[in-house]
Amino acid sequence: QVQLVQSGAEVKKPGASVKISCQASGDIFTKYYIHWVRQAPGQGLEWMGIINPNGGATRYAQKFQGRVTMTSDTSTSTVYLDVSSLRSEDTAIYYCARDFVVVPPTIKEIADYYYYGLKVWGRGTSISVSS
Amino acid sequence: DIQMTQSPSSLSASVGDRVTITCRASQGISNYLAWYQQKPGNIPKLLIYVASTLQSGVPSRFSGSGSGTDFTLTINSLQPEDVGTYYCQKMRGGPLTFGGGTTVEI
């Protein structure tokens, strides 16, 4: 059974950084892009970016450029989301998710034709930013 | 960037009703659109991809249509378990933006 297991809740002060994780199990880690999506309390879903675990290529939503870093560790089948310069507006649940479309192992970049719908989601990691 | 606008933002309907949710893209996205359901307190669930293909295991009362800029999600014969918030998401071209969501109540 395919699962994405996320790290536990974090509480941070404004200006701090946080690094959360998403570990894949049940399938070959590098077969799928991993997306990060966040949801502020009572708000909708917000797509943050995507990483190809096979090589580490990333693409970020412009809003998060320069403040967010996504990385992967194939030895532990884990992807990481690093958010710096935290502010209260970053308080949210952060989800990792993956598509159902397999990315060929020869593809190292982020290519549009390998996402159709986010089928597998982690349970989410709560990040609370407060002074 | 292409914006995704859903309407209505919320609706209330009765069990057995037919419910239609609209998602409009600010520019054409062909049929690269997905729909999700998020029940209260739960994670999102993929319902439909490429605008009209039902994800395996999703009840057939759900259907999607549209292409270009205008898309609809229809729930035929609304059931109590369909309560939740529904989101569209563009799946091509730049950021994979979500619509603002439509909350369905009974």
Image (cartoon, grey):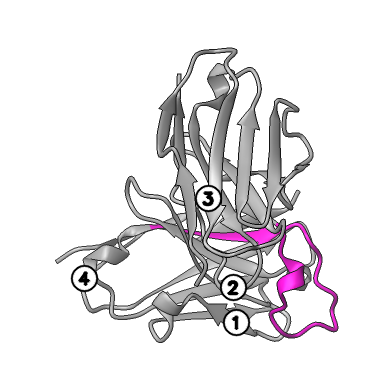
In the rendered image, residues at marks 3 and 4 fall on the same chain: yes
Q: Quadrant of residue B72?
A: top right
- Give the magenta-colored segment's residue range: A93-116
Identify which amino acid the numbered label 4 is placed on: Lys
**What is the chain letter for disc 2?**
A
Residue A73 locus on image (x, y percent): 63, 79
**What residue would you read off at disc 4?**
A13
Q: Earlier in the sequence, mark 2 or mark 4?
A: 4
Q: Is residue A105 visible?
A: yes
Q: CA distance from mark 3 to mark 4?
A: 23 Å
Could you tell me how far apart the alpha carbons at marks 2 and 1 are, in whole angstroms? 6 Å
Q: Which residue is mark 3?
A: A123
Q: Is residue A103 magenta?
A: yes
Q: Which residue is mark 1?
A: A58
Tell me the residue that label 2 is attached to. A50
Q: Amino acid at mark 2?
A: Ile
Tag 2 and tag 4, C-beta contact below 8 Å = no
Query: Marks 2 and 1: CB-CB under 8 Å?
Result: yes
